[in-house]
Image (cartoon, rainbow, N blue to C red):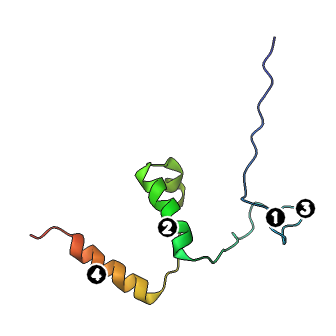
């Protein structure tokens, strides 16, 4: 008995009201989503702690953050560096 070929589907996230039946070409610019950091941070922290390999797919992606968050991150980075 031959095994049936498995077909994998690409998951694009939950369907939204603005989603149409047709899909954009693969070469189209990626869509952007604006959301509160508190909504995604726990998920990213869990993915880092769980060492999810899919994170490496996004290591070169650029993100936009507010200037005050950037200053806090720089201060934190300086604080956690070991003293010489």
Evaluate if marks 4 and 3 touch, with contact meaning CB atoms under 8 Å apart: no
Residue positioned most to the top: 1
Which element carries disc 1, helix, strand or loop? loop
Q: Residue at x 70, y 71 (%)?
A: 31
64 sits left or right of 13 in the view = left
4 or 2: mark nearer the eye: 2
Viewer-closest of 60 and 82: 82
Q: Check disc 1 and report the residue beneath it.
A: 24
CA gap, disc 3 to disc 2? 31 Å
Evaluate if marks 1 and 3 touch, with contact meaning CB atoms under 8 Å apart: no
Which element carries disc 4, helix, strand or loop? helix
CA gap, disc 1 to disc 4? 41 Å
Q: Position of residue 9 (x, y in %)?
A: 76, 45
Q: Check disc 4 and report the residue beneath it.
A: 75
72 sits left or right of 45 in the view = left
- Quarter occupied by residue 18: bottom right
Residue 41 numbered tag: 2
Residue 21 numbered tag: 3
């Amino acid at each position: 008995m031959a095994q049936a070929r498995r077909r994998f589907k690409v998951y694009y996230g939950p369907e939204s009201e603005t989603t149409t039946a047709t899909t954009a070409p693969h070469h189209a610019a990626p869509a952007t989503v604006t959301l509160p950091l508190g909504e995604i941070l726990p998920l990213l922290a869990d993915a880092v702690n769980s060492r999810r390999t899919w994170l490496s797919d996004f290591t070169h992606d650029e993100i936009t953050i507010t200037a005050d968050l950037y200053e806090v991150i720089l201060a934190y980075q300086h604080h956690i560096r070991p003293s010489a």
